[in-house]
Image (spheres, rainbow, N blue to C red):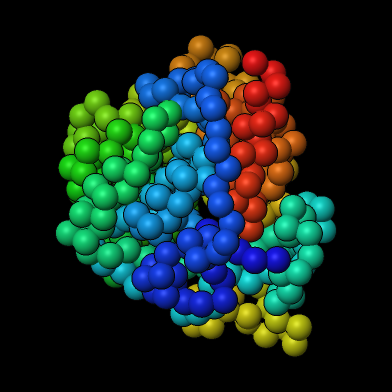
Amino acid sequence: MQPAFYNPNISYEENYTHGPPILSSSQKSPKRRVKKKCKHLGSEVNLPFGIPPGPLLNSKFMKAAFEWGFDVSTYKTVRANALPCHLFPNVLPVTVGKELHPDQTPRLITTKDYSHDPTTFSITNSFGVPSKEPQVWQEDVKKALSYAGDGQLMILSFMGTVRPNQSQEEFVDDFATAARLANDTGTKVLEANLSCPNIGNEGLVCYNLEVTEAVCKEIRNRIGSTPLILKVGYYKSDKDLEKLTEIASKYAHAIAAINTLQVEVVDEKGEQALPGPNRLRSGICGAGIKWAGLEMTRKLDTVRKKNKYDFEIVGIGGVMNPDDYFEYRNAGADCVQSATGAMWNPYLAYEIWKREQKTL
């Protein structure tokens, strides 16, 4: 089984330089004749489906994603400063049952085997959200935007950087600076990655709703009326989810959920599988987290209807085949994205599009 949009067998930097494996393969992107478009965040799109921030490292990856029909795809998260990637490896297959529930299974074992069915496996996602310097990524983002064809939308993800002895105000300012730099590229839609670490090792930003609101308010001040997506993790608390939707209704146009589920990852000897400090725990992507993404989509849709909010929902997590896409859409997602599924199946968007055509 060959990877298409990211090669886990080489380093992040090598992937960044060479581009996606699909570029050097003999596979050709299928042709489509689009009968009808739909609206997503103010833009006409052929299919409300694409790849979230993660596998698409630069304009080479964005070009390939658009050529293969992933019409709503997101450029990997950028920062207001350069930051290196975690040590290689970053992506390893893990043994997961049908569903990964971190409370019940707090530790997973790596398998180093990609040979099984690509629609059923899960992987580690341990990169540390690296970024090039703003002058590098701003120039490349403009190039990537030129590859979006008719009915295609590129989103740019950004985040703030945690530093030692940093105040909350400094973190909020850094986050908003990244937003301004991203907005300066002319990208139509921006995505704030709130599913990233907060200051003081207290967990993800999105779980501290006071910080989340402060960040969102300052982002809105810096980017004007540009449509904004809030990327979040899985919420156990319905009360916290309600508060998140209240924040989104004031400052954003959409909520994207989820990112990953976090657990410890070890090798067959029980030792830390991913090298380097603070990497015993890793985010997990793939089939095992679909239940969490679907649950979040349903809950967000319920709250949206109850409070008559008009934010859109981007459903993410374990979308490995066309059935998963339609399950998310039926749960209330206005748009769906797939990282792991797309990484190994470049035909996924086309397979979904063919199914969509039958309903028109």
* 180 relative position to 217: left or right: left
Q: Nearer the viewer, residue 26 or 165?
A: 26
Residue 170: percent from the left, percent from the top?
22, 54
Where is the C terminus found, in terms of image quarters? top right
Residue 142: percent from the left, percent from the top?
24, 47
Residue 270: percent from the left, percent from the top?
73, 83
* 64 relative position to 211: left or right: right
Can residue 196 be seen here? no
In the image, is residue 45 above or below residue 308? below
In the image, is residue 37 above or below residue 80? above
Can residue 63 be seen here? yes
Residue 341: percent from the left, percent from the top?
64, 51
* 232 relative position to 137: left or right: right
Q: Nearer the viewer, residue 153 or 32?
A: 32
Q: Residue at x 55, y 33 (%)?
A: 32
Where is the N terminus found, in terms of image quarters? bottom right
